Image (tube, rainbow, N blue to C red):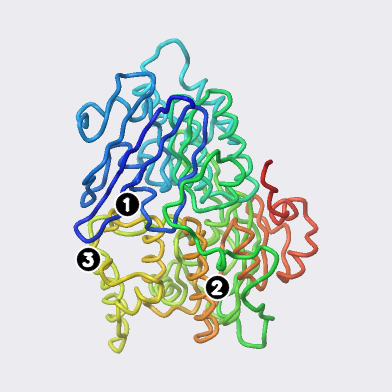
Amino acid sequence: MATPLLSIEQLTLETDARPIVANLSFEISAGEIVALTGKSGSGKTSIATAILSLLPIGVKMTSGTIKWLGNKPEEMSLPKDQAKWHKLRGSHIGFTLQDVYGAFNPVRKMGDQMEAIIKERVQRTDFNILHELHIKMEEVGLHDINRLLTSYPHELSGGQLQRCQIAMAIVIRPELLIVDEPTSAVDKINQAELLHVFTMIRSKYNMAILCITHEQDVVRQIASREIQLETVDKSIVIDLTKSTFSKKEVNDAPVILETKGLVYKHAFGGMSYKQGATIGEIDLGIHPGHCIGIVGESGSGKSTLAQLLVGMYAPLKGDVFLHGVAIDFQKASDVYQLRSKVQLVMQDGRGSLHPHLPIRDILVEVGQIRKKANPDFKINIVESMNEVGLSEDILDRMPGQLSGGECLRVSIARALIVNPEVLICDESTSSLDPKTTLGVLQLLNQLREQKGLALIFISHDQTLIRQMADYIVVLADGQVIESGKATDILNRPTHPTTKRIFAPPATPEE
């Protein structure tokens, strides 16, 4: 058997309240891909941060050892050599974050900060960093590289930022690369490309990869071994071939939210003018209890459309109607009215929560704002947490002490507190395991049935769209390329992009 690069022996991680991981042991050798799986909150990301010696405040390594046996520098182990472990981070052990927006400095251009990070880690002068980075960004499927390098992180999609992280890792060439939910922010087409990238760098550079994921398709396609922190109940894994929830026809009820001729362009000024994501001539109408599925490749404009619908941006042309009344985006009262009825659960669950406030204060703050406008408004934050499958003890913890999945569920709870009529879910279950995902879908479907909650469900996951959508809109470059009843789009897609998105899942390699 090959000599391992990393050996974990009887690792136990705990908080003051509970153990997270108990007596975990495994090894990773050069050139293999090991999948670390488990439900949301089971400790997957905590294990990664323990390997990096970057455990968050409140999480402690109470027993066990982590040994580095790679080529350079000398053999080290945690907790004994904690002071010297920084020599490994970034150079010998690479890491890509699940929170892609938190992985980059928001006030520095991508090219500048990526070059600075690579220069610090590689310590080489025998190659042009930007030239090498340009090549690697193309390898991971990025296009229009010069624009991306001169853009700020907020000007890129989640999928583009994920690819930038991976491109940097390929340039630095660590012996071990830890990737935390690497495909959660990308569509199916781009997911396949990323998985191909991982298998390529494993074979080309003999790089070991520890892949933290809840997606069994990823495990089946690329993993040499799987380490399950908690076995998922096979009886609740969602079946791709059929929908658990009944489909609804558009009824005669009045439209809650409607758009007509909606047009928007991200334009970035300064020394050099650049054009980013675009939305062009989009017409939508959503009824009570109805679910519209918005799909498209990474960068197609899905998130931009969601942000337009809650007034984060003002459209350049066209109108957004709430109960038949056009919203004047220049009036704060109109925008407030829109947001009181239409709530957005963002893809970046952790980044959408205040990092220095406990969860209780984050939820109470929403209730206080609503109570100013409506003195009769009542809030029950414990009930809200229970609705999304979280326990009451979460309320006194900080966002940094929660898993990515727990942060997303808190975001959903916060959105539901104001009793919206329309809930926009922007990849809101992308980091959740199948069991938790199904629980969230059941919750949303229950709210549709009992309260007539309308959903705009943005996702790259064909499984979720098959489950939830009554009507599907397919975007490409900000344009609607195909739309119609879910049954028609799923069974008889006509556009090539739609056919790729809803193609049958890949067969596992023999």
Q: Amino acid at mark 3?
A: Asp
Quick check: 2 above or below 403?
A: above
Residue at image mark 2: 455
**Residue visible at 55% across and 29% down in the picture:** 202
Q: Nearer the viewer, mark 2 or mark 3?
A: 3
Q: Which residue is mark 1?
A: 21
Would residue 430 be seen by someone viewing this image from the given angle? yes
| CA neighbours of label 1 inside 10 A, class few (<14), some (14 to 19), many (20+) | some
Callout 2–callout 3 Cβ contact below 8 Å:
no
Q: Please indicate whether residue 114 sits to the left or right of residue 320 in the image.
A: left
Depth order, front residue of 214/145: 214
Residue ID for mark 3: 396
Q: Give residue 411's quadrant in the image.
A: bottom left
Closer to the chain start, of discs 3 and 1, is 1
| Residue at left offset 41%, top offset 80% | 419
108 sits to left or right of 488: left
Tell me the quadrant of the picture where the C terminus can be found.
Answer: top right
Q: Secondary structure at mark 1?
A: strand
Q: Earlier in the sequence, mark 2 or mark 3?
A: 3
Image position, residue 50 (x, y; %) = 30, 41
Residue 385, picture quadrant: bottom left
Q: From what the image shows, is residue 113 above or below residue 477?
A: above
Mark 3 → mark 1, Cα distance in angstroms: 21 Å
